[in-house]
Image (spheres, rainbow, N blue to C red):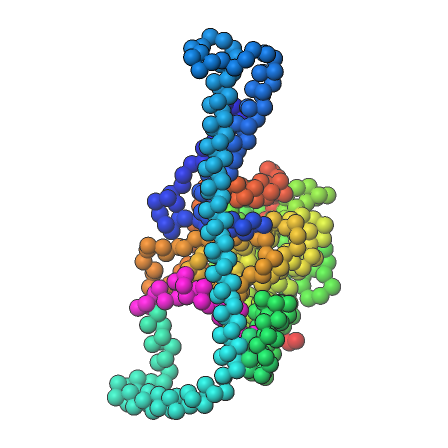
């Protein structure tokens, strides 16, 4: 038969559990491996094709009024041939329908079980957070004798062993090196996600409000309290200490090689920046898939840039891809680098972070206009900022892809084609809490270190951009239809002709 889809190739995911992609969301209730979902799609296509042939055979039968042959018929008559072919196609249609229904039912059953366990975990987290908040004063009093005796024991041990009080961080780091899976475990990651989402419930409990108030105002209710309000509270409490305080930012273009240098249109800014300065650009082919998107996310260690902006299409009708890097500076005190913990906390609090403002400035300086189609892409903090760019409505975001981003609480507008890539053994995405019930992003997960040793000399190795680049390559090899649809959407936006790429660096400006 003509028109049948090609049988999807089975990738190495069947042999290597670390290469297995779990796909969920995207407006469906299905949760399954990408291979299973691809097989179900192929079977549906086969069923539709068989049913189409049945309709054609019905037209052929209408041309011949001869009755169906008897069971003893041995061949030779056209009507008998049509009858035999029809029976065979009926079996193909029925078997493909049954197999597809079974695969979809299995995926829906797994998805329902997963959602049920998530609801139970979130409800348990609400109750646990609220209870701990209510009991906090009593727990502090009860812990005081233990802390006192523990301090005395620590001092005595220090005298006996020669350890110093400042050795604590080194001791903790040594323990983590000896136990590398402690923070790279899907169970730990899932627990942290629930705990992060329950901080606001602990605050409600500590304030003495009744439990129904916490359930009503929190993530499971009206959503007025959540990860964002908790992060905002941390920022407010840190202000007297001078921690996590935002500053103005500026952006400068980063020179790129090789030449030739090609000017791009510039839209002047009214605030701090480099209005009127033309960034150097170089020709670049359009991204072909998820691997290209992840590979082009900038790293400060390469040339100091945090943002890469690619322009495609004509000067009159351009389209853009914006790549945003992850956290660089881990100090809670804001210095020169906007990609720092201060921006992390501000972004989670849904307040204008330095990194977000730097990205918006760079986009405007590069020439991005509000109506131009844009695809923001980012890793870690950069993924959080990419999601915020999509949610802001400042630009015409048609698609967004994030890798390892703590963006669970960001609500994207309808119509945005969104793919979120998370490693189930990566702790960082869990810091964004649990996504809302209305979230329609396509979520792609895998466990990087399933059945493998965790490197003891790397902090959070499942969060590394190199690991997400490997996942991007697996996604490009996947036959899963929705991943292929995203690549098709991206190809439509950027076209087939080379574009121009520029790089940008954000800088915090002293003063507030």
The structure residue drawn at horizontal position 45% and vertical position 64%, both measured from the top left corner, is 190
Q: Residue furthest left?
A: 160
The rendered magenta stretch, by its main secondary structure, is classed as: helix
Q: State yes or no: residue 59 in magenta.
A: no
Q: Tell me: residue 384, above or below residue 159.
A: above
The structure residue drawn at horizontal position 59% and vertical position 37%, both measured from the top left corner, is 496
The percent coordinates of residue 193 (x first, y second) are 49, 66
Q: State yes or no: residue 198 in magenta.
A: yes
Horizontal arrangement in the rendering, residue 124 relative to residue 374 (left or right): left
Q: Is residue 450 visible?
A: yes
Q: Tell me: residue 304, above or below residue 21.
A: below
Q: Is residue 300 visible?
A: no
The percent coordinates of residue 486 (x first, y second) are 57, 44
- Number of numbered callouts drawn: 0
Q: Quadrant of the C terminus?
A: bottom right
Horizontal arrangement in the rendering, residue 165 relative to residue 281 (left or right): left
The structure residue drawn at horizontal position 64% and vertical position 76%, both measured from the top left corner, is 511
The percent coordinates of residue 389 (x first, y second) are 64, 58
The structure residue drawn at horizontal position 41% and vertical position 63%, both measured from the top left corner, is 187
Horizontal arrangement in the rendering, residue 323 relative to residue 35 (left or right): right
The percent coordinates of residue 275 (x first, y second) are 70, 60
Q: In the image, which residues are magenta?
A: 177-200
């Amino acid at each position: 038969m003509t028109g049948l889809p090609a049988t999807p190739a089975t990738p190495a995911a069947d042999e290597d559990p670390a290469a297995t992609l779990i796909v969920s969301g995207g407006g469906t209730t299905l949760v399954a491996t990408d291979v299973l979902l691809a097989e179900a799609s192929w079977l549906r296509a086969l069923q539709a094709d068989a049913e189409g042939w049945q309709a054609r055979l019905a037209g052929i039968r209408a041309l011949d009024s001869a009755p169906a042959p008897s069971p003893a018929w041995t061949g030779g008559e056209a009507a008998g041939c049509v009858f035999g072919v029809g029976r065979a196609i009926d079996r193909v249609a029925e078997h493909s329908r049954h197999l597809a229904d079974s695969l979809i039912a299995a995926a829906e059953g797994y998805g329902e079980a997963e959602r049920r366990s998530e609801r139970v975990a979130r409800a348990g987290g609400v109750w646990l957070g609220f209870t701990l908040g209510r009991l906090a004063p009593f727990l502090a009093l009860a812990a005081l004798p233990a802390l006192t005796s523990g301090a005395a024991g620590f001092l005595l041990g220090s005298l006996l062993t020669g350890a110093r009080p400042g050795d604590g961080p080194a001791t903790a780091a040594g323990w983590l090196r000896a136990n590398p899976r402690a923070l790279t475990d899907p169970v730990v990651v899932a627990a942290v996600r629930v705990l992060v989402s329950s901080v606001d419930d602990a605050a409600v409990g500590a304030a003495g409000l009744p439990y129904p108030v916490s359930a009503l105002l929190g993530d499971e209710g009206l959503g007025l309290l959540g990860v964002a309000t908790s992060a905002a509270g941390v920022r407010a409490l840190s202000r007297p200490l001078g921690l996590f305080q935002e500053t103005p930012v500026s952006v400068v273009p980063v020179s790129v090689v090789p030449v030739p240098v090609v000017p791009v249109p510039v839209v002047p800014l009214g605030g701090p920046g480099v209005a009127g300065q033309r960034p150097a650009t170089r020709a670049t082919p359009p991204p072909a898939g998820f691997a290209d998107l992840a590979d082009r996310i900038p790293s400060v260690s390469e040339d100091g840039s945090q943002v890469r902006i690619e322009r495609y299409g004509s000067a009159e009708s351009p389209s853009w891809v914006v790549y945003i890097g992850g956290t660089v500076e881990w100090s809670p005190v804001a210095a020169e680098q906007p990609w720092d913990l201060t921006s992390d906390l501000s972004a989670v609090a849904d307040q204008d972070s330095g990194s977000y403002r730097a990205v918006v400035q760079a986009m405007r300086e590069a020439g991005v206009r509000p109506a131009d189609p844009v695809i923001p892409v980012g890793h870690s903090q950069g993924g959080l900022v990419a999601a915020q760019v999509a949610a802001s409505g400042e630009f015409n975001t048609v698609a967004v892809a994030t890798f390892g981003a703590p963006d669970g609480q960001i609500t994207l507008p309808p119509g945005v084609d969104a793919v979120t890539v998370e490693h189930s053994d990566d702790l960082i995405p869990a810091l964004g809490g649990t996504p809302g019930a209305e979230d329609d992003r396509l979520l792609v997960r895998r466990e990087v270190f399933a059945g493998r040793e965790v490197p003891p000399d790397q902090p959070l190795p499942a969060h590394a951009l190199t690991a997400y680049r490997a996942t991007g390559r697996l996604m490009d090899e996947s036959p899963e239809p929705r991943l292929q649809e995203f690549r098709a959407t991206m190809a439509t936006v950027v076209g087939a002709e080379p574009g121009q790429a520029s790089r940008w660096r954000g800088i915090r400006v002293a003063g507030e």
